[in-house]
Image (cartoon, rainbow, N blue to C red):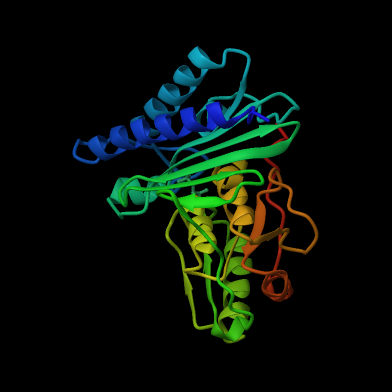
Amino acid sequence: MADLWQNAMDYAVAIARKAGEVVRDALRDDMKVMTKSSSVDLVTQTDQKVEQLIIQSVKEKFPTHRFIGEESVAAGEACDLTDSPTWIIDPIDGTTNFVHAFPFVAVSIGFSVNKQSEFGVVYSCLEDKMFTARRGKGAFCNGEPLKVSDQEDIKQSIIATEFGSSREPEAVDKIFSSLRNILCIPVHGVRGAGSAAINMCLVASGCVEAYYEIGIHIWDVAAGSLIVSEAGGVLMDVEGGGVDLMSRRIVAANRRAIAERIVKEIDSFSPPRDDTP
Ligand code: LIP
């Protein structure tokens, strides 16, 4: 049977590559850096330009499809995931990295129908790595199949996480308390690429055993979530149970036991959901 969404996925890969070129070119220019929810939540004209480029290109080809885009939501659009085919876009995941030329910056495009993820594309554009996953068909990097780590022992693991963009003392205290608990399991190390999408691709590639974060948004993790699960990994909420991409909380791991061990150590909290205006 023909794959209904393969065409859209091929298109997403082509657009992500084009968007990545724009991001790479912009690194050479002077940037105008602006802020959103706080003085450390950065945005540039390139984030906005790349999101418009992606949305306009998709609209030409798939005029009935809907969008959730980081910069469109920042500009006041609703963050609504309906049953319609929906493109979930982070034009630059790792904007702080981009501003500082720290070399982990991704274009992230998730696609969901009936609230089920159909494909995910993460283009790590400074590394020139194209991560893709199609539901039920596996995950790939530059065409090579991906598989999560087979490590079973958390004490032999590397865990990825981020400090996020909240500087509210209560949130920062909880982030440090979780970090301390996890470090002292003890694990081999804690890392963070500065991009949720790339952290998830690191789980899918078997380079780290798990990634967790509180404060991410649906556009940061929509594509990466499918890439992790298609590479054989698991997704969980930070308190256990199923992940809810609107909840701004996620654990992605190579296996359930590692995810559950991390959940035990997380001092959880609940930022305002993406779908509450
Ligand atoms: C960022 C993430 C980063 C996370 C930040 C933010 P942006 O996305 O990728 O890992 O810690 O909270 O969500 O803003 O660069 O698209």
Residue occupying the far front of the picture: 1
* Vertical order, 123 against 175 (above or below): above
Residue 152 in percent (x, y) is at: 64, 80
Residue located at (73% from left, 53% from top) = 243
* Vertical order, 75 against 93 (above or below): above
Quarter placement of the N terminus: top right
Residue located at (32% from left, 48% from top) = 128
Residue 149 in percent (x, y) is at: 55, 71
How many labels were placed on the picture? 0
Residue 245 in percent (x, y) is at: 69, 45
* Vertical order, 82 against 266 (above or below): above
Residue located at (30% from left, 48% from top) = 126
Nearest to the observer: residue 165 or residue 102: 102
Residue located at (56% from left, 41% from top) = 120
Residue 214 in percent (x, y) is at: 63, 57
* Vertical order, 41 against 54 (above or below): below
126 sits left or right of 204 in the view: left
59 sits left or right of 98 in the view: right
Quarter placement of the C terminus: top right
